[in-house]
Image (cartoon, coloured by chain):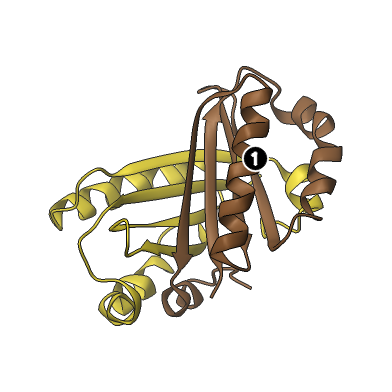
Chain colours: A brown, B yellow
Amino acid sequence: MTYLLQVDFKMDRPFGEEMSKAFVDLAKSINDEPGVIWKIWTENAEAKESGGVYLFETKEDAEKYLTMHSARLESFGITDIRGKIFAVNEALSLINHGPIK
Amino acid sequence: MTYLLQVDFKMDRPFGEEMSKAFVDLAKSINDEPGVIWKIWTENAEAKESGGVYLFETKEDAEKYLTMHSARLESFGITDIRGKIFAVNEALSLINHGPIK
């Protein structure tokens, strides 16, 4: 079973192209974090919110990452961080072509 | 560009195997909703929370689905529904193997 982590928070900038450029090194480092299968980077320039949805191999990996990532975001001055971890329901997700592996 | 919808809410039951069986028809119907590319079904039996993460072809499709789905959840007696729509940052998501297409 895989685990999904969803994180979102308030952020004034960057968005779009500027965001893509600013976080290349951070994105590369995420591939080296234990248990990370994939991450989708999310952004809403209008609402000034940003975040990410991750798939992890285990619940423990997701929990450790969330603790580390929340501290990193806070060190950037980011507030209103919301992180939630869920188990993936495989049978239902497979009906809806969910990329769960 | 694709759009991500994340939805979560409080739910007493069902979870796990019981959830997989209860929502087969609902899952099948979601494949027919306009603009849905995939859905991952999420659950947390301990916290009594459940939800889903969806990828949509357009922002408008995601907005229409969220309006319809929130009303459906409320009709089930579900409360504390939180739905958020984000643009996907493609460049960064591709670095992290994000399934964004």
Question: In which chain is the residue bearing label 1?
Answer: A
In this rendering, is residue A12 above or below A33?
Answer: above
Residue B35 visible to an observer of this rendering: no
The residue at the point 20 percent across, 61 percent down is B12
Q: Position of residue B19 (x, y in %)?
A: 30, 75
What secondary structure is marked by label 1? Answer: helix
Instruction: Give the left or right position of residue B83, taking residue A52 as reference.
Output: left
Q: Which residue occupies 75% across, 59% down?
A: B97
Image side of residue A41 versus residue B96, left or right: left
State which quarter of the image contains the N terminus of chain B. top right
Q: Based on the displayed image, in which of its 4 quarters is residue A68 positioned?
A: top right
Residue B56: x and y in percent read 53, 52
Q: Which residue corresponds to mark 1?
A: A69
Vertical comparison of A18 with B101: above or below: above
Vertical side of A69 occupied by A17: above or below = above
Q: B15 or B86: which is nearer to us? A: B15
Amino acid under disc 1: His
Give residue B41's position: percent from left, percent from top: 43, 65
* Residue B32 picture location, percent across and down: 41, 67
- Answer yes or no: is residue B38 visible: yes
Q: Residues within 10 Å of mark 1 (few under 14, many from 20)?
A: some
